[in-house]
Image (cartoon, rainbow, N blue to C red):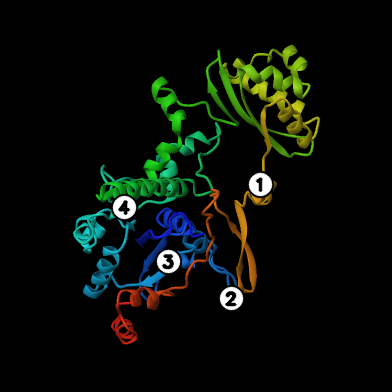
């Protein structure tokens, strides 16, 4: 069966991670995505994380399943071809700096005039309004400005942004959802619209109720080695501890489950003698909280991670090993659900592990593709627009493609 987005056509003038992942996800689900690239140069991320005998892991991850068309959008004929493509498309996406698309003749009003049903998606760093709307942006900038860095900080340690591209990927997922909503609206009403998303906006949403709680109380969250929520009366905690071999585990629970969890691992009596029978102590003074964690560190270091996790799960407590990134890629639940899969790269004589699909469709399963070579689909796409071989060769010689 074709994918659930079979028949949806996308034209994307997008680069980097946040700007490309939404359309790669759509390609996984069967949409035809035409990626516009600069002739002879292409998306700069083709050269990011590239090895001498491997493809670029960055470009492959973010652009799989799409088609590459080289097009010089600074030329009049290049812009005319773009508008021809857009006239037959459902979605157009770009992540140029605010105002750049309008300046170059493919802003929302320009493309809406050729396709009133078009869902026009613009992704920026800070959002389309505000004092810094025209500044460039990166994942680290959004993590820092959006508050996520504080949430994962340790008291007394320098604040750092995360290694994983949290802002890029969050923005990509939000953009993907926004596109699906815009498509539904266009299909049911016949009216297209412009949708704006941003790296910063994605980080603000990602903090969810933790941000709401901080705003309502006008107090920063308790940061450090554990996620502490709620109040002294009804506390919540998610924390990691190491076993006798230094292997970490994590569990998360709220006050009503505290005694059950600690009895399951045999710690409750010792904790009660130490004054930690009530989880609300974690909302007390810092020195008391430090003593609480030191005692749990001591107790978890007396056994094995697998045993602790099994006992906690047996008491219906949410618990798991803390995987490294490579361990996560081999986790049995990850593998069983196809969240990581394998793709053949015959031109590199390799079979490589890649992201699978984060969803499962019973009737229209996703299909994982490869990223295209630069201009790989020039002939196919332009041929469908009515250009013959001589026309295409002429466009190439004139620097249009």
Q: Earlier in the sequence, mark 1 or mark 4?
A: 4
Q: Earlier in the sequence, mark 1 or mark 2?
A: 1
- Estimate how packed mark 2 is, as few (under 14), some (14 to 19) or many (20 or more) residues with alpha carbons within 10 Å: few
The residue located at (40%, 55%) in the rendering is 19
The residue located at (25%, 50%) in the rendering is 190
Q: Secondary structure at mark 2?
A: helix
Against 64, residue 217 (above or below) is above
Q: Earlier in the sequence, mark 3 or mark 4?
A: 3
Residue tagged 2? 347
Residue tagged 1? 324
Contact, CB < 8 Å: mark 3 with mark 4? no
Q: Secondary structure at mark 4?
A: strand
Q: Which mark is residue 142?
A: none
Classify the position of the C terminus by image quarter.
bottom left
Q: Which mark is residue 122?
A: 4
Q: Estimate the x, y position of residue 365 in percent, counting from the top left.
A: 54, 55
Q: Nearer the viewer, residue 107 or 180?
A: 180
Contact, CB < 8 Å: mark 3 with mark 2? no
Residue tagged 3? 44
């Amino acid at each position: 069966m074709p994918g659930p987005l079979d028949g949806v056509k996308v034209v994307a003038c997008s680069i980097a991670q946040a700007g490309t992942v939404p359309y790669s996800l759509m390609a996984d689900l069967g949409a035809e995505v035409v990626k516009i690239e600069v002739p002879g140069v292409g998306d700069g991320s083709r050269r990011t994380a590239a090895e001498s005998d491997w493809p670029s892991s960055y470009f492959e991850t973010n652009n799989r399943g799409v088609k590459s068309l080289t097009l010089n959008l600074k030329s009049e004929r290049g812009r005319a071809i773009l508008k021809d493509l857009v006239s037959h498309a459902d979605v157009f996406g770009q992540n140029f700096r605010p105002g750049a698309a309008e300046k170059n003749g493919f802003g929302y009003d320009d493309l809406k005039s050729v396709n009133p049903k078009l869902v026009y998606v613009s992704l920026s760093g800070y959002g389309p309004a505000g004092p810094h709307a025209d500044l460039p942006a990166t994942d680290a900038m959004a993590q820092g400005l959006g508050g996520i860095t504080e949430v994962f900080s340790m008291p007394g340690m320098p604040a750092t942004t995360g290694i994983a591209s949290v802002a890029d990927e969050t923005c990509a997922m939000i953009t993907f959802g926004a596109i699906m909503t815009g498509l539904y609206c266009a299909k049911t009403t016949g009216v297209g619209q412009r949708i704006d998303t941003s790296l910063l906006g994605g980080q603000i949403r990602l903090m969810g109720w933790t941000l709401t709680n901080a705003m309502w109380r006008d107090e920063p969250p308790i940061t450090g080695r554990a996620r502490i929520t709620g109040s002294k009366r009804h506390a919540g905690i998610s924390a990691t501890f190491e076993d006798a071999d230094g292997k970490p585990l994590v569990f998360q629970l709220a006050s009503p489950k505290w005694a059950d969890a600690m009895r399951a691992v045999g710690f409750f009596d010792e904790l009660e003698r130490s004054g930690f029978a009530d989880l609300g102590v974690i909302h007390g003074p810092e020195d008391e909280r430090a003593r609480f964690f030191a005692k749990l560190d001591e107790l978890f270091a007396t056994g094995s991670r697998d045993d602790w996790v099994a006992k906690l799960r047996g008491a219906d407590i949410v618990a798991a090993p803390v995987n490294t990134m490579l361990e996560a890629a081999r986790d049995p639940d990850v593998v069983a659900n196809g969240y990581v899969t394998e793709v053949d790269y015959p031109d590199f004589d390799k079979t490589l592990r890649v992201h699978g699909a984060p969803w499962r469709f019973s009737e229209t399963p996703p299909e994982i593709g490869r990223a295209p070579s630069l201009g790989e689909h020039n002939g196919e796409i332009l041929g469908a627009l009515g250009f013959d071989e001589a026309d295409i060769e002429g466009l190439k010689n004139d620097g249009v493609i």
